[in-house]
Image (cartoon, coloured by chain):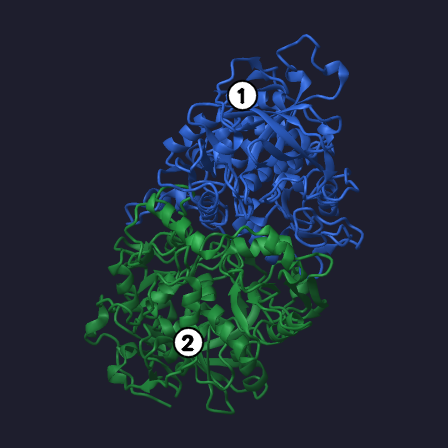
Chain colours: A green, B blue
């Protein structure tokens, strides 16, 4: 479908600059309102000094991630033809409670504890809300429309993120792609390495929904796959792109459920895909069958540079639409491991975890929670659950490994429901003291299962450069039963947990003496004004 | 040598001690308060009003955990107690303990700081812990005469055994009635003990003495006597008691004699390396309350003792450990001591010192051993892991890391275990004949099973180009850019300094400045 070409340079929209923060418990309707909300509570740092997209913006962002400092917005980016701005890891949560900023973005109290936050998000995901369609005139992302030679990717300040990366990337966006045989449209997140003014190579790994559509439908039919890459969409839409929404389900409706309000969509300029109207910028184009360009190396989510370069499908750009002074968010991948957080690691714990928990419950597994391991974003998950019958954990692991956990997740650790899966210490202790190497470590096959090449334990030869993006060699999956099981009696004897009434009394005494006992001491939390003794204060 | 109250002064000065004047009764609330403070990575807690004559202190040698970037480290208070400072690096603490194994000079003698009170031991108000309905001793030090007749006291020596004639032991116990102690101590040094043997139980002893006693009897035999280990960590004075020379600065000195029933060798059948006993635990004679972590590392003997006298310093301070709570004093202390022991051994075994750091994190309940080492040759990972299994029975899981993982950077260590180790090839399980680990909660019947080590180090056979560089600020950006960003940080509008970075140490700051 062809749309009229509205030239760049028309008068700015009213929301071209800063906007008001959302009200208390009001979801952010755009990236801008989310950032304004952070700014209102002192968690944003607008940097007016000119900063280069060439490593400088990402270096500042990585140090902010490492120091758990405020989220940086780079208001002035050098060598950018279009006056766009960069935002470094906008959704990165504070280290002690990573879900706090996503909670704020969704209009939930940021001081909820982990369990409450998960249940609130799960409750919202259970109630999808259909999107509404808006026209071009009211869609912020259509403030400027660029087509043809005017749609030049190099006119935008895509960041060069790590010094050894293969190129500049867009890596925090929502890719919209349609099923050619139905009305279903998938939202997902696949990073794109900018190749030139109108081409990018896109990381498509077979086994995930959009890559499967491309490799096994469009490419087999030798047809291009129309796509839109929506950059800087409203938070609920961004979060939904990282979730595993069932095939055939309306992703925009799930985003609406997550937000608690309908998502506004607008039709693309050069195709009939619908994208979140709140986007800062939309790249419209198609992924070409039979064509490949280099992608990578790239500093990846597990904390290492992975290489070598591999061949990935090619996006050909047809149009770029954007707001005035668009904000381009990016993630310094690899910095969200260990103690530090970034957008990826935060999204895993704050969005993928609740979604996975809901998915397991929907499949008939009455799990308490499914949570990513604190120090590793995607490779290992912790599931707290009862074990109602023999073989239950095997069934559960098998279900996950063959569905959403197939490509990235290598391990599951199962713990009892009284172990908080968001408490690394409790999980670690369960793993160390209740998982018997003799009988509680279970490997699924020996090098029989698929794996994405985004790993460092396979050699480059083992990874290969397969056409569909998965490693040439297979790997294994494993689960660890760290539940007490028949060791329950020993657990009761080993854990010193006084009764709740006594604990509460003890906490009152400590709190009265000035000891910081609360994880709810963020701005606005119930104990925000309590003076604290030092002890092992978390930094 | 830092005595216990001086140690508390240093914690107080560093805002790492909270004093609670409200009534917190020893019978129930004291342990609950200590447990919550440990669970929440809080400061040390001084309870001034417990219904007894002693002031109770928890956390003086405990946590916080290393699962977040914090203002203190798990070993900070142990480091402070050993005169190494609250800011001591992990390896400085380990190196100090390794060096102390050789022992220091014979301690001087001095008058005991404690004076006789006439009160009974129960009136101290020691805390009841974890369901015990009687007061318990958790961080105690015991002194008994050494066994050898040659080393025994002279018949006319009213001063009692000298330092060389005295054993210092870690002791756990409970108080029954007004004058009965039920005690658990390491078996080896009390095999000669009979009824009426004098024993002195010390509470609030200088921390180095407690460390020395634990180092002497837990693990290796090639360690100097506990008083000499303590004196290697700083000067120490001893005072005479009928059971032998004891640290003069101890807060509470309980003189007792072993009761009529013979000592019972027992405890968990799995305990200790090479010294497993056949005897069954006897709860009747054993102390009430939960076992101390060190009891998982050594064969123990239990017996009763009759209290003869109780001497205390003015307003005595008695440390205790909320055993069972995460990051409790006892677990943290054993974590540091056992880590140092193993670190010293593996670096003195093959003629070279390949191990950069080693830790049994208290956070993992001492059930996992992390070791960061140069991989000397293909298969060295296996050799290293299985050497550790042979040196300690506490754990049955070893994680081998590369030296690029900073000491005790648990965040990266517990990332590498999942992402660097191949799930099919790098999780190596032994056969099913390995003895059960003593810190764990399974196979408590002593049955055998597998142990496992995870090889999260690069394969030395790999070509250099296979090795994936880490994504860190230091490795990802050019030096001039890093320097500019660090220099301009506050001008850019940020708030948090380098102390907020994972792995930040004062030493790293100095290195960067130089």
Q: Which mark is residue B234?
A: 1
The number of numbered badges drawn on the structure is 2
Q: Are marks 2 and 1 in contact (CB under 8 Å)?
A: no
Q: Residues within 10 Å of mark 2 (few under 14, many from 20)?
A: some
- Above/below status of A421 relative to B263: below
Looking at the picture, does residue B253 appear above or below residue A153? above
Which residue in the structure is indicated by mark 2? A123
Q: What distance separates the C-alpha of mark 2 from that of mark 1?
A: 60 Å
Q: Mark 1, chain letter? A: B
Residue drawn at 47 percent across, 60 percent down: A333
List x then y, in percent, for residue A220.
59, 86
Residue at 58% x, 37% y is B176
Res B467 visible:
no
Direction from residue B314 to residue A443 in the image, left or right: right
Residue at position x 36%, y 42% from top? Answer: A533
Q: Quadrant of residue A44?
A: bottom left
| Badge 1 element | loop
Residue B39: percent from left, percent from top = 48, 49
| SS for callout 2 | helix
Rendering coords of residue B489 (x, y %): 33, 46
Q: With respect to residue B392, does A416 lie above or below?
A: below
């Amino acid at each position: 479908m062809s749309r009229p070409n509205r030239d760049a340079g028309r008068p700015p929209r009213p929301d071209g600059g800063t906007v008001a923060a959302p009200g208390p418990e009001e979801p952010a309707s755009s990236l801008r309102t989310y950032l304004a909300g952070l700014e209102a509570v002192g968690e944003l740092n607008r940097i007016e000094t000119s900063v280069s997209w060439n490593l400088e913006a990402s270096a500042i962002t990585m140090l902010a991630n490492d120091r758990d400092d405020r989220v940086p917005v780079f208001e002035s980016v050098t060598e950018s033809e279009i006056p766009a701005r960069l935002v470094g890891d906008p959704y990165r949560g504070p280290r002690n409670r990573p879900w706090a900023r996503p909670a704020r973005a969704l209009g939930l109290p940021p001081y909820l504890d982990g369990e409450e936050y998960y249940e609130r998000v799960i409750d919202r995901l259970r109630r999808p809300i259909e999107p509404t369609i808006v026209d071009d005139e009211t869609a912020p992302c259509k403030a400027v429309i660029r087509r043809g030679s005017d749609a030049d990717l190099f006119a935008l300040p895509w960041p060069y993120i790590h010094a050894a990366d293969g190129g500049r990337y867009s890596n925090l966006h929502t890719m919209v792609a349609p099923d050619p045989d139905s009305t279903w449209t998938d939202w997902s997140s696949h990073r794109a390495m900018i190749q030139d003014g109108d081409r990018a190579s896109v990381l498509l790994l077979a086994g995930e929904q959009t890559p499967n559509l491309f490799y096994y439908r469009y490419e087999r039919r030798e047809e291009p796959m129309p796509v839109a890459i929506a950059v800087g969409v409203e938070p609920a839409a961004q979060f939904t792109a990282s979730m595993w929404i069932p095939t055939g389900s309306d992703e925009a409706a799930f985003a609406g459920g997550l937000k608690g309000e309908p998502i506004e969509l607008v039709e693309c300029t050069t195709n009939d895909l619908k994208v979140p109207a709140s986007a800062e910028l939309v790249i419209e184009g198609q992924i070409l069958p039979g064509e490949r360009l280099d992608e990578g190396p790239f500093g990846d989510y597990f904390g290492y540079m992975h290489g070598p370069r591999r061949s990935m499908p090619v996006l050909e750009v047809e149009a770029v639409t954007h707001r005035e002074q668009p904000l381009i968010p990016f993630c310094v991948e690899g910095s969200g491991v260990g103690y530090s957080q970034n957008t990826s690691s935060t999204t895993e714990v704050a969005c993928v975890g609740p979604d996975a928990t809901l998915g397991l419950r929907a499949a008939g597994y009455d799990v308490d929670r499914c949570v990513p391991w604190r120090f590793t974003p995607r490779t290992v998950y912790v599931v707290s659950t009862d074990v109602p019958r023999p073989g239950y954990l095997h069934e559960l692991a098998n279900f996950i490994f063959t569905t959403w956990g197939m490509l990235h997740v290598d391990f599951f650790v199962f713990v009892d429901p009284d172990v908080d899966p968001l408490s690394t210490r409790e999980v670690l202790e369960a793993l160390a003291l209740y998982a018997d190497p003799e009988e509680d470590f279970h490997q699924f096959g020996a090098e029989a299962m698929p794996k994405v090449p985004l790993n460092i334990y396979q050699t480059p030869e083992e990874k290969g450069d397969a056409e569909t993006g998965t490693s040439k060699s297979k790997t294994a999956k494993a689960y660890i039963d760290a539940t007490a099981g028949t060791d329950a009696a020993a657990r009761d004897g080993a854990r010193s947990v006084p009764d709740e009434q006594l604990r509460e009394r003890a906490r009152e005494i400590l709190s009265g003496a000035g000891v910081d006992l609360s994880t709810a001491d963020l701005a606005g939390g119930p104990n925000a004004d309590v003076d604290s003794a030092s002890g092992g204060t978390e930094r | 040598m830092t005595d216990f109250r001086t140690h508390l002064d240093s914690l107080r000065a560093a805002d790492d001690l909270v004093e609670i004047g409200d009534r917190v009764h020893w019978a129930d609330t004291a342990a609950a308060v200590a447990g919550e403070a440990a669970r929440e990575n809080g400061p040390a807690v001084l309870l001034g009003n417990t219904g007894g004559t002693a002031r109770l202190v928890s956390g003086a040698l405990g946590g916080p955990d290393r699962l977040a970037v914090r203002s203190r480290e798990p070993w900070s208070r142990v480091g402070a107690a050993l005169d190494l400072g609250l800011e001591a690096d992990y390896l400085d603490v380990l190196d100090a303990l390794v060096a102390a194994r050789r022992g220091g000079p014979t301690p001087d003698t001095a008058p005991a700081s404690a004076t006789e009170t006439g009160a009974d031991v129960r009136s101290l108000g020691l805390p009841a812990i974890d369901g015990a309905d009687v007061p318990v001793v958790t961080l105690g030090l015991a002194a008994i005469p050494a066994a050898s007749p040659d080393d025994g006291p002279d018949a006319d020596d009213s001063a009692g055994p000298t330092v060389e004639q005295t054993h210092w032991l870690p002791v756990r116990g409970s108080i029954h009635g007004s004058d009965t102690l039920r005690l658990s101590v390491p078996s080896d040094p009390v095999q000669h003990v009979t009824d009426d043997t004098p024993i002195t139980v010390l509470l609030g002893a200088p921390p180095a003495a407690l460390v020395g006693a634990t180092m002497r009897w837990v693990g290796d035999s090639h360690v100097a006597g506990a008083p000499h280990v303590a004196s290697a960590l700083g000067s120490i004075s001893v005072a005479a008691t009928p059971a032998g020379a004891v640290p003069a600065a101890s807060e509470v000195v309980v003189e007792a004699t072993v009761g009529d029933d013979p000592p019972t060798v027992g405890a968990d059948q799995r305990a200790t390396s090479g010294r497993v006993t056949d005897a069954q635990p006897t709860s009747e004679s054993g102390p009430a309350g939960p076992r101390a972590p060190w009891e998982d590392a050594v064969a123990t003997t239990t017996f009763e003792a009759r209290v003869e006298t109780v001497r205390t310093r003015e307003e005595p301070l008695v440390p205790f450990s909320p055993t069972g709570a995460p990051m409790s004093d006892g677990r943290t202390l054993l974590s540091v001591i056992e880590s140092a022991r193993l670190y010293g051994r593996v670096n003195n075994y093959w003629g070279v010192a390949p191990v950069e750091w080693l830790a049994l994190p208290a956070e993992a309940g001492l059930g996992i051993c992390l070791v960061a080492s140069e991989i000397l040759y293909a298969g060295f990972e296996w050799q290293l892991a299985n050497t550790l299994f042979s040196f300690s029975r506490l754990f049955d899981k070893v994680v081998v890391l590369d030296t690029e993982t900073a000491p005790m950077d648990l965040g990266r260590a517990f990332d590498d275990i999942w992402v660097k180790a191949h799930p099919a090839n790098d999780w190596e399980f032994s056969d099913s004949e390995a003895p059960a680990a003593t810190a764990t909660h399974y196979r408590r019947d002593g049955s055998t099973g597998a142990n496992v080590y995870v090889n999260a180090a690069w394969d030395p056979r790999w070509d250099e180009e296979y090795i994936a560089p880490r994504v860190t600020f230091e490795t990802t950006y050019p030096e001039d850019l890093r320097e500019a960003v660090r220099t301009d940080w506050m001008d850019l509008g940020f708030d948090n300094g380098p102390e907020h970075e994972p792995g930040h140490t004062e030493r790293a700051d100095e290195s960067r400045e130089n």
